[in-house]
Amino acid sequence: MIEIKGLAKAFAISKGNKLSDTEKQDVRYSEKAFHSVRDVSFTCGNGEVLGLLGPNGAGKTTTLRMLSTALKQDSGSVFINDIDVLQKPIQARKEIGFLSADTGLYGKLTAFENVAYFARLHGMKDSAIKTRIDELFSMLDMHTFANRRVDTMSTGMKQKTAIARAVVHSPKVVILDEPTTGLDIMTVQTVLDFIKSLKAQGTPVIFSTHHLDEVGALCDRVVVIDKGVSSFSGSLAEFKQLTPDGDLRQAFLAIIANQAQQGAA
């Protein structure tokens, strides 16, 4: 279970930097800081897949980094299975599998060596590591390049390896930042099937994406972030009901347009 309430994060603006005319019109800018995330709240229950949507620069990645403990929030709360991320970040981190936009892999190590290395960092024993890697490599169709160095891999191979690294310790919660970006159709399908398997195991999954077909196929819940605010949070059915014909693209555009109108008011 993931519970987020009133999450906010600002980054200081360097002294001497003057705001452009466009930035002056952006509600996220003040004289001293850029308020990347201003007020984000949502929940994701066990066995639910939550799709995190928003324009580029909306605050999605900053939000996910706070959930993963990579960033400390300025205000608001994050609970991972009743563990307060701000108060107990090390304990919370053990519960989380996080895939960032940067794969975080070592180029001179093989796929197997990379995943095994991170498994040892999580305190797993060698016998358990081999069994777990074999399971993951089968699920993600990785056996054919298990002994290939990362710096010789395709983008899809690297992404599969990064996903295996993120979940090797069987986390209770999985957070994926745009896991299918830049992948071919077959690799995308493998990743989506893997997310479905996590859902079937009762694992809460949060993933950010720009692909609304993935949202329609996978998600139980949808959150839209725009200008650092969660402007929609609800079920997929509620999201579809925002337009007469249930078109996801039009629903998304309607939320963004409504947010823009409120900002201009």
Image: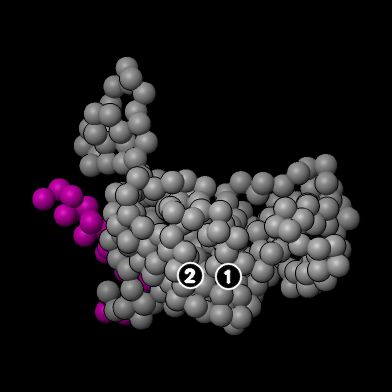
- Residue type at mark 2: give it: Asn
Q: How many numbered discs sit on the rendered protein?
A: 2
Residue at 52 percent across and 79 percent down: it is 47
Residue lying farthest to the right in this orientation? 147
Residue 172, numbered circle: 1
Q: Residues within 10 Å of mark 2 (few under 14, many from 20)?
A: some
Residue lying farthest to the top in this orientation? 16
Residue 81, numbered circle: 2
Q: Residue 78 at what x, y percent from top left?
A: 40, 59
- Position of residue 235 relative to residue 174, above or below, is below
Residue range (magenta): 243-265
* Residue depth check, mark 1 versus mark 2: number of the one nearer the observer: 2
Residue at 80 percent across and 57 percent down: it is 116
Contact (Cβ within 8 Å) of mark 1 with mark 2: yes
Quadrant for residue 151, please give it: top right
- Position of residue 51 relative to residue 245, above or below, is above
